[in-house]
Image (cartoon, grey):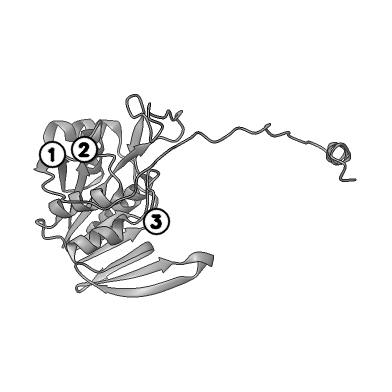
Amino acid sequence: MKIVVPLKQVPDLVEDLELNDEGTGLDYEYLKMKLNEWDDHALEEALQIKEGGSAEVIAVAVDGEDVDKMLYTALAKGADKAVKITGANPYADNQELARVLANAISGMGADLVLVGVQSAGDRDGWLAPILATHLNMPTVSVVTGLEVNDGTATVHKEYSGGIMAEFDVALPAVIGVQAARQTPRYAPVSKVRQIQQSASIEEMAAGDVGDVVTSTVEEMRHPEKSGGARILSSVDEIVEVLKEKGVV
């Protein structure tokens, strides 16, 4: 079995996020990036399947700043191969990103494509179904449980209100992973450095994405700040505030 896992870097939300001069997006020049947490769960689920049987795990990412480090980290965690797609926009929306990934994945003979269900930079969270359309594969998203047996993936899908459903999906398929069966593993820095010296990253051109119908951000703003919060430590303080506000 061959499992392909697209990985994406997203802004580290603990950092201050600055807007570009046009006010239509983030200024990425000095922004710290990190692996999208849902992609990390998709990678962990792929590695769990590999360890439970016979599978090859391929990590794929669009070229960008620190992408090599992200891919070497995936190899250090247990991925068998890393592929970097060159000549594409690493910050593209899901419509364009899906085309780029489909061009790369279509020639890999994937039995299973595991995609993070969303990312911090998404405007729609629809990467899995759009990618599945381009690859002509069935798809189920928001998956929190996955088992693979005899060419079929049995998945547990979560709906709003905590409702769970079980589906059998014929492979090859694209699965949008909400959560892996266990917390994503950590790769020590020493192991990542060792992998950097012994392993290599394959490069692949993005190819033609054609005309992509997508949305456009007209304006982006920082949230407006309010008057702040007041911490109350006793019932007497709560009563006093309510009196000040004319509630009691």
Q: Which residue is mark 2?
A: 72
Q: Earlier in the sequence, mark 3 or mark 1?
A: 3
Report x, y in % for residue 155. 34, 69
> Which residue is pictured at 46% across the width and 28% down the height?
16
Report x, y in % for residue 1. 16, 63
Q: How crowded is the residue under tag 1: few (<14 C-alpha within 10 Å), some, or many (20+)?
A: some
Query: Mark 1 belongs to which amino acid?
Result: Ile
Q: CA distance from mark 2 to mark 3?
A: 22 Å
**Callout 1 touching callout 2 (CB < 8 Å):** yes
Q: Which residue is mark 3?
A: 179
> Which residue is pictured at 25% across the width and 31% down the height?
65
Q: Quadrant of residue 231?
A: top right
Instruction: Determine whether 4 is above or below 36 in the image.
Output: below
Query: Mark 3 belongs to which amino acid?
Result: Ala
Query: Mark 2 belongs to which amino acid?
Result: Tyr
> Which residue is pictured at 16% across the width and 48% down the height?
80
Left or right of 190: which side holds 158? right
Q: Nearer the viewer, residue 53 or 171?
A: 171
Q: How crowded is the residue under tag 3: few (<14 C-alpha within 10 Å), some, or many (20+)?
A: many
- Which element type, helix, strand or loop, lies under badge 2? helix
Q: Nearer the viewer, residue 235 or 195?
A: 235
